[in-house]
Amino acid sequence: MKKAAICFTAYGKALIEKLNEKLEQAGLEKAQAYISMAGEETPEGFESVTSLTDWTGRQFEEHNAIIFVGAMGIAVRAISSFIKDKLSDSPVIVIDDTGRYVIPVVGGHGGGANKLAVIMSELLDAQAVITTSTDSHSAFSADVFASENGLRISNREGIKKVSAKAIEGKAIVLSIKDYPPESGADIIIADETDSEYDLLLTPKRYTVGIGMKRDTDRHKAEQFLIEVLKANDIDIKDVYAFASIDIKKDEEALLYLKDKYSVPLIIFDAPVLNRLKGEFDSSEFVKKTVGVDNVCERAAVLASGVNGKLIVKKQAGDGMTVAVAKRF
């Protein structure tokens, strides 16, 4: 996930520079640096922002991690009209411009803001201020568990029930269907079940293989992807991973899709793709160009695991190809 950091004072500018230096030293991706200071010359390494609302909206659209270096009030006003869903909102973090506190505001669990805040606080020798109750009580967090294990939360109201029980120090019973599930379990992991439970987590079953021409427009790529999924009754929330070939790993459109939908991007090189046995929609032109006769179908199947099966063959449009495999 890309990071975008914005400041409003000279102190904030120095802090972003320090943060990026520390991130680079730790082998982590630096934050894109922005500054909003009326009448001031834009410093080197920063981009000037004239409309904070427009800037914030763009970061939410691209699902970047947003770092405000300044007052909490500025951040709250800036993000207020863009917050929609705690499970999919961009992570938002505030750092005071003295660098004493790092505070996740939105997306603490689902967006990973809490984890990022802890990392940045350690780099800056600052105090991470975590206010989510499960973290404060060192209790089990169902939404973090789901995110880290590639599971979709089917009934979001169940999060509160499970969290309340965990905070009280009570045991959380987790059951996986076909083992069989235990009646009365707090959490059931299954595609569907009639058992009693507070929270239902469903495995994300689909892997999407993507091939594309160089510099494919990201919005056209997104539109075509969504069209293919909808035509096959697949919700993008059920996508476990995107997959492609290594020479496309830096394509802006691919990275945009990965970040916006918080879906991992799995990359394979041509020899690995070529070793996969099966019947695929072969193209000599593609083979001459990238070294493998079909990127999207092969990548989708490889990413789906040992028992994966191709369920949507290559679909082409808007400079890209899309195929879908199902994990079993």
Image: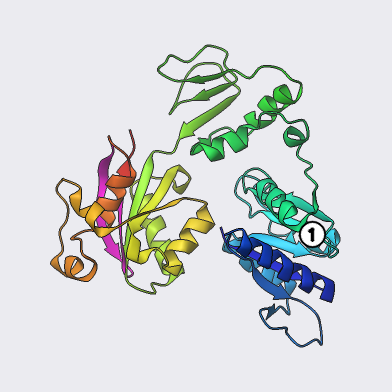
Which residue is more in the foreground, 160 or 207? 207
Answer whether residue 233 is visible to the viewer in this image: no
Q: Please tell me in which quadrant of the rendered image residue 294 appears.
A: bottom left
The residue that appears at 67% across and 48% down in the rendered structure is 107
From the viewer's perspective, is residue 214 above or below residue 191? below
- Relative image position of residue 243 (x, y in whole percent): 36, 53
What is the residue that sits farthest to the front in this orientation? 25
**Residue at 43% of width from left, 14% of height from top?**
180
Q: Position of residue 217 (x, y in %)?
A: 42, 72
| Rendering coords of residue 327 (x, y %) | 34, 37
Relative to 109, does residue 92 appear above or below in the rendering?
below
Q: Secondary structure at mark 1?
A: strand
The residue carrying mark 1 is 95
Q: Quadrant of residue 172?
A: top right
- Provide the major secondary structure of the magenta segment: strand
In magenta segment, residue 93: no
Examine the rendered structure and indicate whether residue 177 appears above or below residue 273: above
Q: Relative to residue 118, is residue 254 drawn left or right? A: left
Give the position of the C terminus as an image quadrant: top left
In the picture, residue 171 is in which quadrant?
top right
Give the magenta part as a residue range.
308-324
Judge whether residue 323 is colored magenta: yes
Residue lying farthest to the top in this orientation? 183
How many numbered marks are there? 1
At 80% across and 80% down in the image, what residue appears?
A: 37
Q: Counting other residues with Cα less than 10 Å from the Cα at mark 1, is it few (<14), some (14-19), or many (20 or more)?
A: many
| Horizontal side of residue 78 vs 296, given as left or right | right
Q: Tell me residue 28's x, y (percent).
A: 58, 59
Q: Quadrant of the N terminus?
A: bottom right
Q: Is residue 1 left or right of residue 141?
A: left
Q: Amino acid at mark 1?
A: Ile
